[in-house]
Amino acid sequence: MKIRFEVIDRKTLHERDMRDIEQGRVQEEDYIFSFESMEVFNRTFTEKRINMLKVIRGKKPQSLYALARILGRDFKNVHTDARMLEANKLIFLKKVKNGKRVSLKPVSRADEIEFRMAI
């Protein structure tokens, strides 16, 4: 799955989308997240959340607890960030039964993430 983040104002986004529709262009990405400013982007996708995506993709932790240990972060904060990433369809949390316990294994949905910024 290909995901694109972009920082672009609403007017420019609307003009581009209308031009793409008129020209019959097809969207290449599975998901596009558009933000009006870097401030809004940075509040939503913090450095810690982006790092979390990298770790999930690269190290493939078996649970949120293992992810928290790898990241050296508090479990509650990792859980909150993981739920936000799941809500935005960047990861999914797979229920894994381990004896009597059920844990959540974070799995990356993205093969590629692209970032664009209009200047």
Image: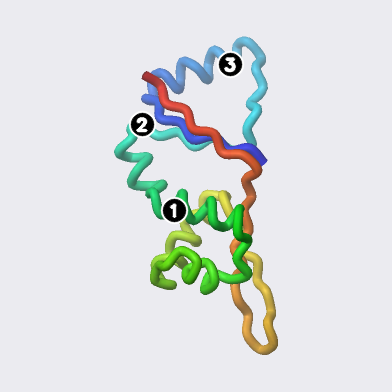
Q: Quadrant of residue 40?
A: top left
Q: Which residue is mark 2?
A: 36
| Callout 2 amino acid | Glu
Q: Quadrant of residue 1?
A: top right
Residue ID for mark 3: 20
Residue at position x 44%, y 60% in the image:
81
Residue 111 x, y percent position in the rendering: 65, 43
Image point (63%, 61%), residue name: 60
Mark 2 element type: loop
Task: Say which element carries label 3.
Answer: helix
* x and y, in percent, of residue 43 in the image: 33, 46
Image disc number at residue 31 = none
The structure's colour scheme is: rainbow
9 relative to 105, above or below: above
Q: Amino acid at mark 1?
A: Arg
Drawn side of residue 34 relative to residue 112, left or right: left
Disc 2: CA contacts within 10 A as few (<14), some (14-19) or many (>=20): some
User: Which one is earlier in the sequence, the residue at label 3 or at label 1?
Assistant: 3
In the picture provided, is 22 more to the left or to the right than 81?
right
Q: Residues within 10 Å of mark 1 (few under 14, many from 20)?
A: some
Q: Amino acid at mark 3?
A: Asp
Q: Which of these two is toward me, 15 or 32?
A: 32
The residue closer to the viewer here, 25 or 51, is: 51
Between the C-alphas of marks 1 and 2, the distance is 19 Å
Q: Residue, x 50% and y 17% (percent of image)?
A: 16
- Disc 1 versus disc 2: nearer the observer: 1
Q: Which residue is mark 1?
A: 49
Of marks 3 and 1, the one in the foreground: 1
Mark 2 and mark 3: Cα distance apart in space: 19 Å
Q: Which image quarter is the C terminus in?
A: top left
Secondary structure beneath label 1: helix
Q: Position of residue 3 (x, y in %)?
A: 58, 38
